[in-house]
Image (tube, rainbow, N blue to C red):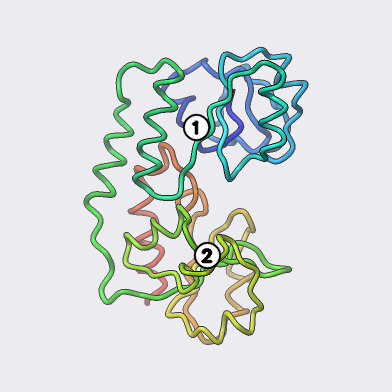
Amino acid sequence: MSLVPSLTEAVAVSAPGALVGVTDWCTHPADLGGAVRVGGTKNPDVAAVAALRPDLVIANEEENREPDLAALRAAGLDVLVTEIRTLDQALAELARVLGACGVRDRPRWLDEAEAAWAAVEPCEPPRTAVVPIWRRPWMVLGRDTFAGDLLARLGVRNLYGDHPERYPRVPLEELNAASPDLVVLPDEPYRFTPDDGPEAFPGATAALVDGRHLTWYGPSLVSAPRSLAAALRAAHR
């Protein structure tokens, strides 16, 4: 069973029928067969997970809470916890997860994702950006994040990439004072839209991007570089 939407998609397309349970946020692929919904990533129903008796529970150190994972282990379940903070880590962890789920042959989409990102050419000239992920209060990408690594490969430097925190709360006035070339606004976890986000940054160009392509690690990595690069180019017009 999977407690991580990205990994749910990876397992579902590579080992159809293997998943007995998923979270309420697991939206891809659309058809997950008979997989039971067991709550959110941060508040799974531990008893419901245990009742499914999965051979393996797939989790992530950022997406899921340690107390829930400890409770699952205490219930006698095998829990595989991934750590994904860079693209290279994502590709390695995806291979590990799929191997643990009994996928013997490396799936074609994983090779395609690796090739797609290897072919990326960073934008010229390089751009600086702030990357909000929430408002009320404003939160942005900080150090050591998967999304930040993807943007760096596309030629976009996160101005808060050296912040001590990974997802710092930063006042809007400070974000604007940083004078970024771009404000990158994903549509998840907060759903930034043309009418909700860009207006807060009158001095910068806003790039609205697909949050799944920026933050998910799985089959979406194949199309992510093309999608993100197109959104960044469009923001420069």
Q: Position of residue 38 (x, y in %)?
A: 71, 27
Q: Position of residue 2 (x, y in %)?
A: 58, 28
- Residue placed at 55% from the left, 28% from the top? 58
Label 1, secondary structure: give it.
helix
Q: Is residue 135 above or below residue 128?
A: above
| Position of residue 134 in the picture relative to residue 123 (left or right) | right
Determine the image quadrant of residue 133.
bottom right
**Quick check: 178 above or below 77?**
below
Question: Disc 2 marks which residue?
Answer: 142
- Amino acid carrying label 1: it is Glu
Q: Residues within 10 Å of mark 2 (few under 14, many from 20)?
A: many
Give the residue displayed 63% in from the left and 16% down from the top: 34
Circle 1 residues within 10 Å: few <14, some 14–19, many ≥20: many
Dot 2 lies on which element? loop
Which mark is on residue 41? none
Q: Position of residue 128 (x, y in %)?
A: 40, 75
Name the quarter where the C terminus is drawn. Answer: bottom left
Q: Nearer the viewer, mark 2 or mark 1?
A: 2
Q: How many marks?
A: 2
Q: Residue at x 42, y 24 (%)?
A: 98
Indicate the quadrant where residue 104 lies.
Answer: top left
In the drawing, what numbered circle is on residue 9? 1
- Please report contact status of discs 2 and 1: CB closer than 8 Å, yes or no: no
Marks 2 and 1, how far apart at CA: 26 Å
Amino acid tagged 2: Gly
Splitting the image into 4 quarters, where does residue 54 fall? top right
Instruction: Choose between 206 and 93: the one closer to the eye.
Output: 93
Q: Quadrant of the N terminus?
A: top right
